[in-house]
Image (cartoon, coloured by chain):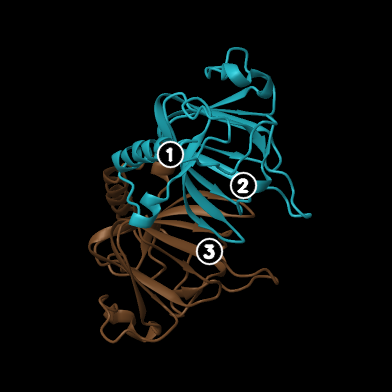
Chain colours: A brown, B cyan
């Protein structure tokens, strides 16, 4: 990902957060995480994050999704015998289509990203409007996509160990690589 | 606490939450918790809460404080060998004066509630403006008060066991008693 692309995405995320009335410290604002997951098609697959706190007991983040942007399918496995991450997504703005393990919904509302369609395998649809939330059990495959206006999602969870997330798409690496 | 007082406080809390752009489900809105802590002086001591989620691993709440309203001094002890609650207060609106164990601040900004002044014993001041946060270690005495415009605070924490909170004021009971 080019540095200029990171800056542009951060600025867009800042506007969405400010528009939702969310105050950030200047340090948080300057360090909004832009995750293209190594796929280099941020507009369709990726997300933007502000991590408020991540202790050895709990974590809280804001997730920003641009219109139609998708967080690819992944799960949070156990690590060294410690149960995988449990997380609650609470929609704040926009609509979020969330997919988890379970009976497939016949006609899902999200559009599976074409370039990666073999790596989306769970299609049990949960629709989250503002004020609605859903808790994902540990080690459960899930992916989610914002509706046409983008979305803002608060994530409350047990401790995050992002580097241990298991993505279905083997091309994905969670840690960003930024080029000048 | 009279039921009519609970309803009035819920309505005030709803307005503050809506004013901050926070969407609630109709069930959450109808069940905003009004905690007068058995002291029957809600305007000076007490708080209003929406608990989004409280699993066996983490918890997330919104805390509403009316202008000058104070959450009395308490701590979260270990329970059955499990470490006490760790919590992060993130100010969203207004200003919050938070007091924790540590060197006393010479001239604190909060006004200790007169009717309970013997039960406030820690005076290390932390000022939280919107976007600022502070993490309170387990089993640490703390209390907090909203500034003149009230405040809205997001609380991210380990699991809440409110019924085991230890308040410095022995007259306090955490569970509400509502009279018709």
> Picture coordinates of residue B3 (x, y %)?
43, 40
> On the rendered structure, is B131 left or right of A157?
left
Marked residue nearer the N-terminal end (2 or 1) = 1
Q: Nearer the viewer, residue B50 or A82?
A: B50
Task: Decide if residue A121 is on the left or right side of residue B79.
Answer: left
Tag 2–tag 1 contact (CB < 8 Å): no
Residue at the extreme front: B180
> Which residue is at a point 48% across and 27% down the rendered structure image?
B69
- So how many labels did they put on this image? 3
Badge 3 crowding class, 10 Å Cα cut-off, few under 14, some 14 to 19, many 20 or more, is: few
Q: In terms of secondary structure, where does tag 1 sit?
A: helix
Q: Residue at x 58, y 12 (%)?
A: B107
A94 horizontally vs B49: left or right: left
Task: Identify the residue position indicated by label 1 in the image.
Answer: B6
Chain of the residue on which disc 3 is drawn = A
Mark pair 1, 3: CA separation: 42 Å
- Which label belongs to residue A10? none
């Amino acid at each position: 990902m080019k540095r200029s692309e990171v800056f542009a995405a951060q600025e867009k995320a800042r506007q969405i957060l400010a528009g939702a009335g969310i105050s950030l410290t200047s340090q948080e604002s300057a360090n909004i995480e832009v995750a293209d997951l190594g796929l280099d098609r941020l507009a369709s697959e990726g997300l933007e994050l502000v991590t408020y706190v991540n202790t050895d007991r709990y974590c809280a983040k804001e997730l920003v999704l641009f219109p139609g942007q998708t967080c690819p399918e992944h799960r949070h496995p156990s690590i060294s015998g410690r149960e995988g991450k449990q997380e609650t997504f609470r929609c704040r703005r926009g609509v979020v289509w969330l997919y988890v393990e379970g009976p497939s919904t016949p006609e899902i509302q999200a559009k599976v990203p074409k370039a990666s369609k073999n790596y989306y395998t769970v299609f049990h649809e949960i629709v989250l409007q503002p004020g609605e939330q859903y808790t994902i059990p540990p080690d459960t495959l899930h992916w989610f996509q914002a509706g046409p206006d983008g979305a803002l999602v608060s994530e409350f969870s047990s401790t995050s160990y992002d580097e241990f997330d298991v993505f279905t798409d083997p091309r994905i690496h969670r840690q960003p690589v930024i080029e000048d």
